[in-house]
Amino acid sequence: MLTFCTLFNDLRINRKDEDGSVVSDFKVPITYSAKEITLQRARQDPDLNRPFALSLPRMSAELANMTYAPDRKLGTFKKIVIKDVNKPNSPKYIYNPVPYDLDFNLYILAKFEEDANKIIEQILPFFTPDFVPTIELLPEMGLIVDVPIVLKSVNHEDRFEGPFESKRIVLWTLSFSLKGFFYGPVRTSAIIKFIEADLIDLDTLGRFEQVHLQPGLTANGEPTTSANDSIDPLLINKEDDWGVVTEIRYGPS
């Protein structure tokens, strides 16, 4: 929701007098609120000193619907892995996200048609019909993703409800679909440095031998296949030029 609202949080309009001089310039506020709630607050009489009366123009946005998007589905068990500079042997990873289309409505409310048009004119040129901002979704993973936001429809209303002298509200409703993702938790996993494999005699079902594998690196940074010449395997990093130490731990049983 924050990503969506941020797209529209710096819109400004100005008002001019008859000779074209700017008499006021202001930023149009945006809030997260349903349409009917915003309309109700905007209609309240500010002369009654009610704290919820709203000044116009303004914008509000709401999440209208969420739909699973199978056409953007990625492999469920594929991982996104990054190296943690503070823990080189414990990389961070997350599984591929789940795709959802998030439908948002943006409401533009104004007392004057000209104000509403000035806001609309700052939005529509950027959606053709999509706009693709680049968003940092997971700062701890450094994950930066292009997220398409598609403008689906634009509707206009001129609302007069109640007696003629009631407050007029010009309402524009813009419907968008954000092609989003939901990510699971960030996990940490140690690098596998030791492998032990039991070889079984299928005739007797007895253990034939056990093979032990581990990385090997000399103190001078040279790869080695000898356990006696290698430093402690726990000190060897994934990026080092290491060899593979192979040991047969058990012979025929």
Image (tube, rainbow, N blue to C red):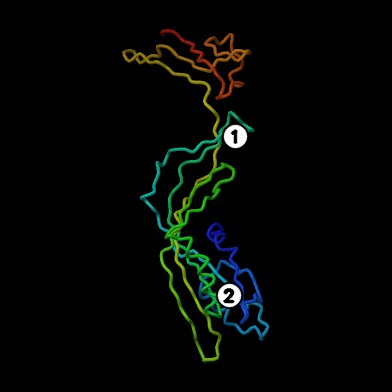
Report the amino acid beneath label 2: Pro
User: In the rendered image of this protein, does residue 233 appear above or below residue 143?
Assistant: above
Residue occupying image coordinates x 65% and y 72% = 25
Q: Which mark is residue 57?
A: 2
Seen from this angle, which residue lies furthest right? 49
Left of 217 or right of it: where is 96? left
User: In the rendered image of this protein, does residue 118 appear above or below residue 17?
Assistant: above
For marks 1 and 2, the one nearer the N-term is 2
Circle 2 packing at 10 Å, graded few (<14), some (14-19), many (20+), is: many
Percent coordinates x, y for residue 247 in the rendering: 49, 11
Seen from this angle, which residue lies furthest front? 19
Residue occupying image coordinates x 58% and y 75% = 57
Report how many numbered discs are placed on residues in the image: 2
Left of 23 or right of it: where is 67? left
* Residue where numbered disc 1 is placed: 84
Name the residue nearer the viewer: 210 or 74: 74
